[in-house]
Amino acid sequence: MDDFVCMILIEWGLEDWIETFRDQGIDKENLFFLEDQDIEKLISKVGPRANFRNRLKVLKEEQNRNPDLKPSPIQQEQKNTTGQAEVLPSTSDSDLKTGKRKLDEEESNKGQRPPKRHCTNMTKSFPEIRILSEVKNVMTHVLDKLRSQDNTKFTAFLRKKIRDLETDKRELVGVFGKTGAGKTSLINAVIEETTLLPSGDVNACTSVMIKVEANMSNTNYEAHIEFITKEEWKDELWSINQYDEETAEQKKHDDDDDYQDVAEKLSAFYGEEWKQKSCEQLMDTRYFREIPEFLQSTRKILSCETAKQLSTRMIKYTRTDSNQGTCNGIKRWYWPLVKCVTVRVPHNSFLQHVTLVDLPGNGDRNKSRDAMWKGIVGQCSTVWIVTEINRAAADKESWEILKSISSLIGNGGECSSIHLICTKSDMIEESTDHSADVQSLILGRNMKAKEAVRKEYNKLNKIKKHFGGDCFQVFTVSSKEYLKPKFLSLQNTEIPKLQDVLQKLNDRHSETLNYVSGARGILSLIQGANFTKIPGKNKDVCKELERNMALHLLPVEKAMGDTWRVFEKCLSEGVEKSKRECEKMLRNFLFPRGKSGRGFDKTLKSVVKKGGVHKPKKRKEIDLNRKLTSFLTDSIDEEFRKTFPNERKGGPFNGTLNKFSLGTENLKQKYKDVQLQLRFLKTEEDKIKVKLNARIRDQKKIIYNSLTQTTEELMEECYKTAAGFSGPGMLEKMRETLTKHVHETKDTMFVKAKDVMMNHLLSLRVEILETVMDTLKTSIDHSLRTDSCSVLDVSTELATVQNFYNDLVNSSH
């Protein structure tokens, strides 16, 4: 698709269909030949389709009468950006809104905020969208040409480089908060889809992980439902068999989280039938007629035209209802079988490169769901913790969530921003509907709440070891006032501030610039290969490049060696402290204050059965492995954050990798005959640094978490032994088994955990150096040592991409 069609769709308020027109290859020439049946296929909704058809008819008539009457949309944009007077008449607000997706009836009530702010954001970012589209078209054309060339090492190298230009890095925003705090209302308001996620039912809560992202492929609202495996569900069924009838009756009135959890799931899915049937009977296919995808181990996809329709259909897959039996017309709830639901919203610019994840605050008792939960939490670059404003600073549950996830999102993850979001900020006791200045009262209370929250956060010294000084922010928001204003201005609801957070994470300009820069480098290499090579000069250039590479790798290698020595020293101290303190720590865990033996035996039984980790339904997680490893992690937390900062400005290893350079800019002045090849090598240098920074981010999680993982592995046999005890004396036997094992292995267990981490660090060091040297040496060889000459003349394509590159660079200054 060319820029003419893009600009036409933007001008007519039909930007939601840009991707569809692009996929179908609609350009200026064939636009005017579209028939009614073609338009029906391109635009699925009646209103926008009618708008497009009428506007296209008018455009055809005007161009037939006088082809020179109006400039093309691209010419118009160029005139606007250069400050010349506009030729086309201005477009009214009503015209811009024509053709956009209609709001649900309840969103169109008088007094509500103007909807779909993200549509105007898409218009503002159009220059980058257009440039990216144009350059991708250029590179697709060049790739097609290369496929028709002889299959040499050089052409294979070029094809691979063009394919590698495509990147789709998504930023994850994890949203945590207890039931009733307003998580779903917040998400709905921020992305301006007020009926997307179900909220407001005091008897229901979100029970599964829900990802919300943009649907860029079509205009439907979709839910992609991923189920747990059949084997995992069988395990849930079999686990209930451990209780005989008498014990089961007792558990109903007892505080047995395991029994209550499984019983709740079975009741939601089977009703009361599960109590009279065997496990084999409960796996009968008749129970799964509506979800054959579960038995087939595939995803179920729900697709609807409106957000409200999708919300209604997916409730049974995502929500726990505390009222047993039929509710909202639902007889059978499927959430116990669901692992994750990905909701896709059509062409939402807030979510273009961002995924919002509504997360249960304490992981999940199901092993695979918990593994997915930990993986997602570790990938979050931003975390939102949602709480009600009336008790934000004193809300223990919110602070417990932050404490429990801090190591997973900090040194063990990649989070650089923590936002504590106080919801329902419009509610204030001192006001009435007749108050003269309710907004001032609300804003005054909100400022006090923010200050109280910041003071509480500043007390959390252990958590702050994982994060930079300016990572924590407080927002006071009102979804209600944003949608139906009564007292607060738009900005004072602070929803726009959170929308700005998402827009910055999208970082559309950076993605476009990276792609265009890479394309410019590849085209430069292709064009440079057309020129006659001077063997002597090329040899001299190669020597200088390789000398610069070796010279600039020395600081990187030194920084990594210094890091290894610092961690060796810190961990050695941590090992010694672990040996001294671990038995005392274990004793405090095994004999907790204020708990009777009868109450604690069930808790400890759950801990050892689950490999040292127990997730109570209404209390904070118990992780004995992390407790045993805490002296090791405490010893390195501060140094680890400095070495592997989640903030991406400085970069890992004191920024030495980001400072690495081949010195191509200086060499261009000396070797003007190979300037195009040197330009390509500069883009290769930039790409390898981006690639390695991403790789280091992934590896540093493995390195940090290896301490706890190794400890868990070394405790595994002990846990299995302890879990085998039952009957009278069970608690004493479990305590004795754990105490004896830790006493006998403390001299080797912590040393082993340290050694595993140090080996991971060493492997990362080797990988970084080898990747830089191998990648750049290969690129230097293909640029300056290859005997193959390009048979492609890409001078026109290079000039086009160079102009786009200049525009992007100039606009960023």
Image (cartoon, rainbow, N blue to C red):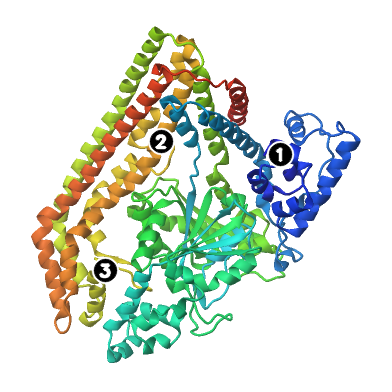
Front residue (pair 456, 210):
210
- Give the number of the disc on residue 152: none
476, above or below 260, in the image: above
Query: What is the spatial separation of the Cα atoms under label 1 and label 3, in whole angstroms?
Result: 59 Å
Assess disc 2: are there few (<14), some (14-19) or many (≥20) residues with their C-alpha within 10 Å of its C-alpha. some
Q: Which residue is mark 2?
A: 650
Tag 1 and tag 2, C-beta contact below 8 Å: no
Q: Secondary structure at mark 1?
A: loop
Q: Nearer the viewer, residue 307 or 580?
A: 307
Image height of 422 relative to 4, above or below: below
Residue 186 shown left or right of residue 81 in the figure: left
Image mark for residue 27:
1
State the residue at coordinates (58%, 72%): 200
> Of callouts 2 and 3, which one flags the residue occurring earlier in the amino acid sequence?
3
Q: CA distance from mark 2 to mark 3?
A: 40 Å
Amino acid at the residue labelled 2: Gly
* 1 or 2: mark nearer the eye: 1
Residue pointed to by mark 3: 610
Query: Where is residue 383 shown, x and y percent of the image?
Result: 46, 55
Element at label 2: loop
The answer to the question of whether label 2 and label 3 lie on touching residues, with beta carbons closer than 8 A, is no
Which residue does the image show at 43% across and 29% down from the upper left? 157
Mark 2 vs mark 3: in front: 3
Name above or below for residue 344 compared with residue 590.
above
Front-most of 736 and 364? Answer: 364
Badge nearest the viewer, 1 or 3: 1
Residue at 39% x, 21% y: name it: 780
- Separation of marks 1 and 2 at Cα, in angstroms: 44 Å
Q: Name the residue: 44% across, 30% down.
A: 156
